[in-house]
Amino acid sequence: NYEHLKDLEWMIGSWIDQDEEATVQTDCQWTKNQNFINRSFAVVVGDEVDMAGMQIIGWDPIAKQIRSWIFDSDGGYSEGKWTRKGDDRWFIQQKGTLPDGGTTSAVNVITRVNDDSFTWQSVNREVNGDILPNVDEVLVVRKPVE
């Protein structure tokens, strides 16, 4: 499945998104044989991890599309269908389930800026059918090697 995922290879590595309120740390790595990308993430507020989780990104040979599955530390999970627009932009249609059984949906937009940065935005968000405001675009940068 590497042939179908190789356009996401730039994501491999450690990333950070930080503002006054929180820091999001993300690590992406290939699984054995490069059939999936494993993405782990943690949202840190102050000195404590507020939420953490993992995402598996892979190729769906039936739908002929990249798909992803997210599982978070609060007990929620979601599934995404990836669509590429142009050379460097991905739209991920997410549908999820909250820990209480509620439903969520959103379109997450990832735009590669260069090898060391990308932007992320979440739009068309809903929880239990109620419309939520869009999340402003944020810049995510490759974590410097220590």
Image (spheres, grey):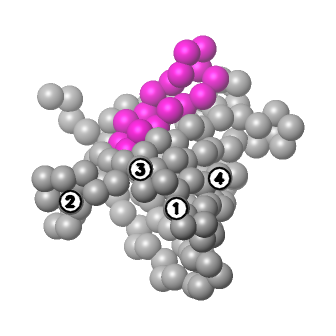
Q: What residue type is labelled 4?
A: Gly
Q: Tell me, yes or no, whether the two marked residues, 2 and 3, touch with CB atoms within 8 Å.
A: no
Residue placed under numbered mark 1 in the picture: 99
In this view of the protein, which residue sits in the foreground, 76 or 13? Answer: 76
Q: Which amino acid does label 2 sit on?
A: Val
Classify 10 Å Cα crowding around label 2: few (below 14), some (14-19), many (20 and above): some
Helix, strand or loop status at disc 1: loop
Classify 10 Å Cα crowding around label 4: few (below 14), some (14-19), many (20 and above): many
Residue placed under numbered mark 4 in the picture: 80
Residue 117: percent from left, percent from top: 36, 47
Which residue appears at 37% of the width and 36% of the height? 27
The picture quadrant where one finds residue 17 is bottom left
Which residue appears at 62% of the width and 44% of the height? 68
Which of disc 3 and disc 1 is earlier in sequence?
A: 3
| Distance CA(mark 2)–CA(mark 4) | 26 Å
Which residue appears at 41% of the width and 67% of the height? 137
Q: What stretch is highlighted in magenta?
A: 26-41
Helix, strand or loop status at disc 3: loop
Which numbered dot is residue 45? 2
Residue placed under numbered mark 3 in the picture: 73
The picture quadrant where one finds residue 96 is bottom right
For discs 2 and 3, the disc positioned in front in the rendered view: 3
Q: Is residue 63 left or right of residue 85?
A: right
For discs 3 and 4, the disc positioned in front in the rendered view: 3
Q: Which amino acid does label 3 sit on?
A: Ser
| Distance CA(mark 4)–CA(mark 1) | 18 Å
Residue 109: percent from left, percent from top: 54, 60
Which of disc 4 and disc 2 is earlier in sequence?
A: 2
Q: What residue type is labelled 1?
A: Pro
Helix, strand or loop status at disc 2: strand
The picture quadrant where one finds residue 114 is top left
